[in-house]
């Protein structure tokens, strides 16, 4: 007699954010210079993030911590793990390619960012990407593929050669399995072992019209290198696409900055309107910033960021992108108020809790900061 044993299934726990060392549980070589790293979320939980968001990873190089941002390539509907897909192009990505193996640990914090289909729901989407800028839009596609409802998605990816097409096989499989998905890949040239028989060259106005005749009726999400982004922005404008429906995130090389940027800056409202003391001309005051951990008082001139003022005073505070993107310099504002313009490296609830990014915050009065 065969007995069927039924074990109760426990609903996964959910985490709104993570700031911990995650264990690498899988590595996949996607192309010759792109690697996917699968990391275990603590307690086999599901990390709440929106498709297209990114995390900050920190590694130690020459005894110093170095942080970069990488988009989560997996879907938020995937529980227990998250996947980062990284192109080798700088010191941190080089470390991730050469040093991180299953069983290894990686410091991860996040998620962050506002570049997401969740932020702009629509009946029809156009996902445009180039090179390793494919990762955020791939997270969006993977999420839509696992979601209920009716979808209409066109995915156009640009690569240098067939050998450089990230997620090539998966895109083919998804296109074959999903009737609502159309995938087009554009290659500039052949690879050594494959003659490309699809669309060739670079994405142009005529080619975009050919591939997506109804482009003006779609919500557009674009990610790739800066020249590609500039070109696509111009193409969409020429075709009459509504700028409010065109969303971009630029891909920045890992050679001196964060892995992603380009989110629209968001102001942090000052805690009070008394940013300038009596007798000071507005915008010309110098304020004192007290850093409690460092035990230092730093003068900060009008328009100068707290991070820049600290560096000028000889202090080295944790930082990376200097653009309000990575969140490395996030600190607690204890007293005072600041003017903060950021690129998505801090969450609304953190701003409400008086967290600030030192790289993009200028004091409006004397401040005390836990840094």
Image (cartoon, rainbow, N blue to C red):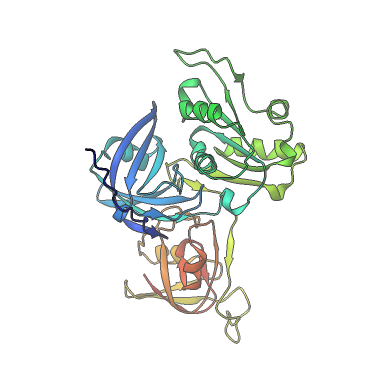
Query: Which image quadrant is residue 280 in?
Result: bottom right
Q: Quadrant of residue 368?
A: bottom left
In the picture, the quarter occupied by the C terminus is bottom left
Residue situated furthest bottom in the rendering: 278
Asked if residue 311 is positioned above or below residue 24 in the image, the reply reads below
Q: Is residue 303 left or right of residue 356?
A: right
The residue located at (74%, 46%) in the rendering is 242
Residue 64 place in picture, x, y as percent? 28, 52
Q: Residue at the location (35% across, 39% down)?
A: 37
Extreme-front residue of the structure: 1
Query: Would residue 20 be found to the left or right of residue 307 on screen?
Result: left
Residue 290, above or below 122: below
> Seen in the image, is 166 located left or right of residue 40?
right
Q: Is residue 283 left or right of residue 205?
A: left
Q: Position of residue 66 (x, y in %)?
A: 34, 50
In this view of the protein, can residue 74 be seen by the observer? yes
Q: Residue at x 45, y 52 (%)?
A: 321
| Residue 113 picture location, percent across and down | 51, 54
Residue at the image position 58 percent from the left and 62 percent from the top: 266
Q: Nearer the viewer, residue 143 or 58?
A: 143
**Can you give x and y, in whole percent of width and height, for residue 30 in the image?**
40, 29
Viewer can see residue 61: no
User: So how many labels did they put on this image?
Assistant: 0
Does residue 201 sit above or below 22 in this rendering?
above
Which corner quadrant holds the N terminus? Answer: top left
- Which quadrant would residue 175 be assigned to in this image? top right
């Amino acid at each position: 007699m065969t007995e069927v044993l039924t074990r109760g299934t426990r609903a996964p726990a959910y985490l709104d954010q993570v700031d911990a060392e995650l264990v690498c549980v899988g590595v996949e070589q996607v192309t010759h210079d792109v690697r996917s790293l699968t990391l275990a979320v603590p307690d086999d939980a599901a990390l709440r993030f929106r498709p297209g968001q990114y995390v900050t990873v920190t590694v130690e190089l020459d005894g110093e911590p170095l942080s970069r941002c990488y988009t989560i390539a997996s879907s938020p509907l995937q529980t227990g793990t998250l996947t980062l897909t990284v192109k080798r192009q700088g010191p941190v990505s080089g470390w991730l390619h050469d040093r991180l193996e299953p069983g290894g640990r990686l410091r991860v914090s996040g998620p962050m960012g506002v570049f997401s289909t969740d932020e702009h729901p629509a009946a029809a989407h156009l996902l445009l990407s180039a090179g390793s800028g494919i990762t955020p839009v791939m997270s969006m596609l993977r999420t839509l593929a696992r979601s209920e409802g009716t979808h209409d998605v066109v995915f156009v990816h640009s690569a240098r050669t067939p050998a450089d097409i990230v997620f090539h096989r998966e895109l083919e499989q998804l296109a074959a399995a999903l009737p609502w998905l159309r995938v087009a890949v554009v290659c500039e040239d052949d690879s050594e072992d494959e003659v490309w028989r699809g669309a060739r060259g670079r994405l142009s106005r005529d080619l975009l019209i050919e591939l997506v005749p109804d482009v003006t009726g779609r919500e557009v999400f674009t990610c790739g290198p800066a020249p590609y982004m500039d070109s696509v922005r111009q193409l969409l404008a020429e075709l009459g696409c509504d700028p409010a429906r065109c969303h971009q995130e630029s891909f920045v090389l890992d050679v001196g900055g964060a892995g992603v940027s380009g989110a629209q800056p968001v102001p942090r409202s000052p805690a009070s309107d008394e940013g300038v003391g009596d007798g000071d001309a507005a915008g010309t005051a110098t304020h004192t910033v007290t850093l409690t951990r460092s035990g230092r008082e730093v003068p900060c001139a009008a328009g100068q960021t707290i991070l820049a003022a600290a560096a000028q005073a000889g202090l080295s505070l944790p930082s990376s992108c200097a653009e309000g993107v990575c969140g490395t310099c996030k600190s607690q504002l204890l007293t005072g108020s600041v003017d903060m313009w950021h690129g998505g490296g801090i969450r609304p609830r953190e701003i409400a809790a008086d967290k600030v990014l030192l790289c993009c915050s200028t004091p409006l009065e004397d401040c005390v900061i836990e840094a």
